[in-house]
Amino acid sequence: MTGILLVEDDEALAELIASYLQRFGYDVSVVHRGDQALDALHRHRPDLVVLDLMIPGLDGLQVCRLIRQHDAELPIIMLTARHDSDDQILGLETGADDYVAKPCEPRVLLARIRTLLRRSAHGEQPSEAKRIVLGQLTLDLAERQVQWRSQRVDLSSGEYNLLVILARHTGDVLSRDQLIHELRGIEFNGIDRSVDVAISKLRRKFEENPSDPQRIKTVWGKGYMLSRREWDD
């Protein structure tokens, strides 16, 4: 059974979310403080974490950072204030793979969980071993591992999923709408910054000069493109 750790200090909301997810077959563990989250993580070993930003003990950003120190791939969905884009960007920069604005509808959260788990090794194993090789960049789709210049690169689940999508369409320009739909199963709403944040983080890991990217390019007014030739060096 797929396990989910829910970290939410609003007990009524936590009970509502947990009950709803359990109806769809998920094993949900709940804690109400950030300083309880890591212990619960070790005890329950969940397949995905739903993490409120504003929680006592340790806040959601601190918990997210601590999780990422030990597990680069565990999917994390952060619950943020509905209109606070700064909180959403901070969550993504810290290592969250997705966010849901509060007050959240359980069915929206369920859809995001399903989308992340489909794309995660924690939720679904690939049926056969496959690789994408671009010069010195290798994406092992079976193991969900990335090597660059013979060195393993640790990526969050969201960063990895985005890189795979770009690599499968090398040389093609993909719009934000296309990328968000591939990643999260929703349409671009005009303000979602998750793709831009993930692109920025990928550039910091693969570009010599992230401010002048050559491998993951911006095509102004159209979207992003993974270059065919710049991965050989």
Image: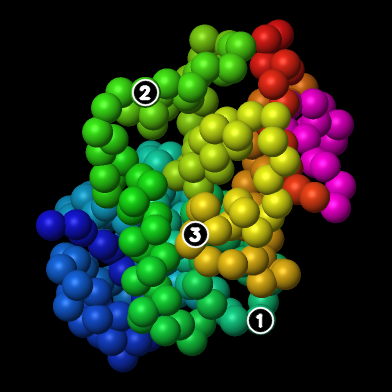
SS under mark 3: helix
Residue 100, label in figure? none
| Residue located beneath label 2 in the image | 130
Near mark 1 (Cα within 10 A), the count class, few <14, some 14-19 or many ≥20, is: few
**Relative to 113, 170 lies left or right:** right
Q: Where's residue 76, x and y in %?
A: 42, 56
Residue placed furthest toward the bottom: 12
Which span is picked out in magenta? 209-221
Return the residue nearer the eye: 168 or 107. 168
SS under mark 1: loop
Residue drawn at the location 70% of the way across and 51% of the way down: 175
Q: Nearer the viewer, mark 3 or mark 1?
A: 3
Near mark 2 (Cα within 10 A), the count class, few <14, some 14-19 or many ≥20, is: few
| Residue located beneath label 1 in the image | 83
Amino acid type at circle 2 is Lys
Amino acid type at circle 3 is Arg
**Relative to 144, 169 lies left or right:** right
Residue 184, label in figure? 3
- Spatial CA span between label 1 and label 2: 40 Å
SS under mark 2: loop
Q: Where's residue 114, x and y in %?
A: 34, 61
Amino acid type at circle 1 is His
Q: Is residue 103 visible?
A: yes
- Spatial CA span between label 3 and label 2: 23 Å
Query: Residue 215 colored magenta?
Result: yes
